[in-house]
Amino acid sequence: MRLSRYFMPILKENPKEAEIVSHRLMLRAGMIRQQSQGIYSWLPLGKRVLDKVNAIIREEQNRSGAIEVLMPTLQSAELWQESGRYDDYGKEMLRIKDRQERPMLYGPTNEEMITDIFRSYVKSYKNLPLNLYHIQLKFRDEIRPRFGTMRSREFLMKDAYSFDLTKEGALHAYNKMFVAYLRTFARLGLRAIPMRADTGPIGGNHSHEFIILADTGESEVFCHKDFIDFDIPGAETNFDDVAGLQAVFDKWTSIYAATSEMHDEAAFDVIPEGDRLSARGIEVGHIFYFGTKYSEPMGAKVQGPDGKEHPVHMGSYGIGPTRLVPAIIEASHDDNGIIWPASVAPFDVVVINMKPGDEACDRICETLYGGLETIGKDVLYDDTDERAGTKFATADLIGVPVQVIVGPRSAAVGEVEVKDRKTGERETLTVEAAMNRLAGR
Ligand code: ATP
Ligand code: MG
């Protein structure tokens, strides 16, 4: 992408409305625009990051055996009357009427709809287990939308729903998602800690919030330090290995971790003082086993091996991609701007032409730009006439992991400078060596 033809509306001033660093940087880098309170457009740079986050979420959902669908944002109130949640949900739900005066709503979540799909088609335990997910906009009329897309009213959610004949089956489905989540957040460059969450009347140990530590987080959290070094399950994980997944779950739930709502001071105090971590955190995912809470009232039953009908055991599993983007920034930035983990960076490389119009600079930049694009790299080519200082500031602000700086003096001798955004290290290389280096990244 040539910057001169791109749409990346950088703000020079710090936006007054932004209270936390990720919101400030997302506005300054031209990633998002607020359209009305808590409702955002994603501009090209932001959209690129969001797409990469979604791609990783999708890969890990698919790896675990979940299957993608797409349900609508607008739902009929009838389904919610069946489950009993239409009246319970309160003011967070946006209720609408269509031209026939039929009550509709903008979905805050999809348990009812997916249960309806399930009951329409699946009649036998032989078609289980099943886990269906989608990545779709949700609307919740939050009392206090704030921090940009961290807590917005309209936001994207990946929500998966599992169906099993028995509770044991459902707990294996839960463990699959548990492992998929550990992998997903690690690939996004985040250390997420699963913390026991309230299961309400259902009880048990089967609701976890995945929290990343950040000073600006809205949750107060308490956990054992050892989580920081726990190994993440590998890509070769066999998701059908019931005992293997259970072992991962047991390990990750063997030491203390809780948000303030579930905090148990006495249990926390048992941890040696030097191993206690009390901090703030951002909830980026939430998984929940809820048994037959929806299948029973909505009649989602399958025939078991005993020939009888059984309501299915269900779980739901959410991740917030539009919250993850700012969460990644909270975890990875410096005074000059964002530092993207390579896995979600909007571009792999930015090539900075210090003197457009200079024959050697132009030639080398075109060689690098074309060559890197050809081998599948996402390259931003800064071919604009801005001052050098502005170009450097922009490259740092938008956080692309590698910068290649092409100035007239070194270009004349066939050399460029390669700068690592994270460490700030710079190295002078020949064009060929730079190409090889970047191709290997
Ligand atoms: P919170 O306690 O932060 O309001 P929640 O418990 O309401 O979250 P869930 O219903 O479990 O959230 O939704 C699953 C995921 O969707 C959350 O873990 C979060 O990543 C994301 N999410 C929820 N509400 C919002 C929001 N208002 N803005 C952005 N993302 C959200
Ligand atoms: Mg909420």
Image (spheres, rainbow, N blue to C red):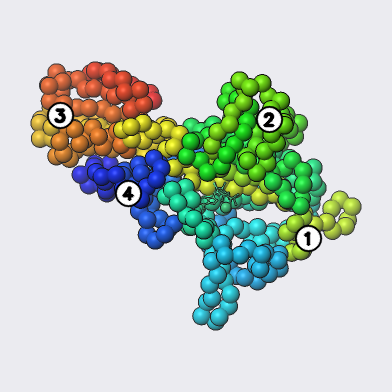
User: Which residue does the image show at 39% across and 36% down from the upper left?
Assistant: 345
User: On the image, numbered disc 3 is attached to which residue?
Assistant: 361
Residue denoted by label 4: 16
- Rounded to the nearest whole Å, what is the CA distance between mark 1 and mark 4? 50 Å
Q: Is mark 1 within 8 Å of ligand 1?
A: no
**CA distance separating discs 4 and 3:** 38 Å
In the image: residue 365, left or right of residue 157: left
Q: Earlier in the sequence, mark 4 or mark 2?
A: 4
Q: Which residue sits at x=72%, y=31%?
A: 267
Which is more N-terminal, label 1 or label 2? 2
Q: Is the residue 133 above or below the residue 175 in the image? A: below
Quadrant of image for the N terminus: top left
Q: Amino acid at mark 4?
A: Lys
Q: Describe the element under mark 1 as helix, strand or loop.
A: helix
Residue picked out by circle 2 = 268
Q: Residues within 10 Å of mark 1 (few under 14, many from 20)?
A: some
Please name the amino acid that badge 1 sits on.
Glu
Amino acid type for the residue under numbered disc 3: Cys
